[in-house]
Image (tube, rainbow, N blue to C red):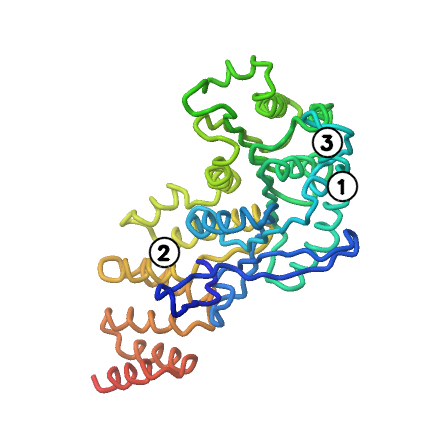
Amino acid sequence: MLLVLSYATSSAQSKQLLNIGQSDTIYSKILKEKRTIWVQVPESAYSKTNHPNTYPVVYVLDGGVHFLSVCAVINQLSPGAVPEMIVVGIGNSENRTRDLTPTKVKEARGSSAWVKDSGGGARFTDFIENELIPYIDNKYPTANNKTFVGHSFGGLLVVNTFINRPELFNNYIAIDPSLWWDNEVLTRDITAKLASEKYKNKSLFLSIANPLPADTEKDINVLIKDNSINTEGLRATYRFSKIVSEATNSAVNFKYTYYENEDHGTIPLISTYDGMRFLFSWYKMSGKLVDIIKNPNTTAAALTTGFNTRFEMLSNHLGYQVYPEEEMLNNLGYMFMSHSPKKSLTFLKMAIKYYPKNANGYDSLSDYYRSQNDLQNAILYCEKAFAISGAEYHKNKLKQLKNK
């Protein structure tokens, strides 16, 4: 879920406005300038009763344009299809071309003026690595799992970082990247580079837009044979994608997708969605575990083993300890309470094991024992819930149980 920072109203407007994330600034000694960033933290991070949480971090270039859409995708997909994540949008300076291009060129696309300061990508990446990431890690509950997202020149920097500093991020999403830059400099020798062990356990999703009007050619096999300036970007990105996807010596988890009905401006949202689904394809609960949960003959031991296996896998993928969501365990406990009490008890005990400071888990166990006509344990667990919450609700519930 998203972090709602405030609701604002004005005399001229009665509707409530929802703000997502918060704005911040960081001064960069490397860039010698102040940079604006936007940060969204999952709402669960602020729960005082949940198990201490850390979260993967998504760093988004051109944050002023793409921060909200990336937040929206992650808020929609988490926690079922992707983990909850912190999102950091990185604002641009006045010289976007300087920051996002990996090499200096004298001319591009028939002009020299707009590229005179090009080639600052390495310095900008230094800022991200040595200043921004440590700042975010120090201020927010981050885990050591990071994703880098960029569009156009931002995608160019994402690919450059993937090639030259793959250790900086676990995952990369390059949205219609400008791989035509400097005569396709990033495609040179890419096959030989991919043989390195440093690309192991790294994932890259790359998208390609159709640069032509919607009512014209869509077949990529036709477009890659075109020699006009209109298809230069598509051809460059397609060449890079084919080389990487066909590299037999590569350990990279790679996928590229051509969107025939999306142009350079419309492609970011769908690319972010598909990219996140690809990068975290292993995250969604497997059918095997669902079958174990649904099977009426499943034992409590088998349930526990199934959940332990899943969350051990998630922990190994993400690089930090992952626990079952308290809400999920609680919901499953109530779902099975009437017709499969052993399953119900297993889930509710898990909730207390992982979230011992949460009164809700003890309250749910009280309801469980009440459903089994075990008044003594119903009172015991209601007392534990009340001891944590001090809530009037638990006080009154306890009184009702003792009067039975």
Task: Work out whether 84 lies above or below 97.
Answer: below
Can I make out residue 309 in this image?
no
Dot label at residue 120? 1
| Residue topped by disc 3 | 196
Which label's residue is closer to the chain start, 2 or 1? 1
Q: Amino acid at mark 3?
A: Ser
Foreground: 44 or 365?
44
Q: CA–CA distance between discs 2 and 3?
A: 45 Å
**Horizontal relation, residue 144 to residue 7: left or right:** right
Circle 3: is it few (<14), some (14-19), or many (20+) Cα within 10 Å? few
Quadrant in the picture for residue 344? bottom left
- Residue highlighted by disc 2: 300
Q: Check contact, mark 1 vs mark 3: CB within 8 A.
A: no
Judged from the image, the secondary structure of the residue bearing numbered disc 3 is loop
Residue 357 percent coordinates (x, y): 47, 73
The one of 129 and 31 positioned closer to us in this rendering:
31
Say whether residue 10 is left or right of residue 205.
left
Could you tell me residue 202's position as x and y percent?
63, 38
Of the numbered discs 1 and 3, the one sitting upstream in the chain is 1
| Relative horizontal placement of residue 100, taking residue 175 as reference (left or right) | right
User: In what element is the residue under mark 1?
Assistant: loop
> Is residue 107 or residue 60 the one in the foreground?
107
What is the distance, in whole Å, between disc 1 and disc 3 at their CAs?
25 Å
Kindly give the residue lying farthest to the left in the view shown.
404
Looking at the picture, which amino acid does disc 1 mark?
Gly
The relative height of residue 59 versus residue 376 in the rendered view (above or below) is above
- The structure residue drawn at horizontal position 46% and vertical position 30%, both measured from the top left corner, is 262
Q: CA distance from mark 2 to mark 1?
A: 58 Å
Amino acid type, callout 2: Ala
| Mark 1 neighbour class, 10 Å CA radius: few under 14, some 14 to 19, many 20 or more | many
Q: Which is closer to the viewer, label 2 or label 3?
A: 3
Residue 115: x and y in percent read 73, 35
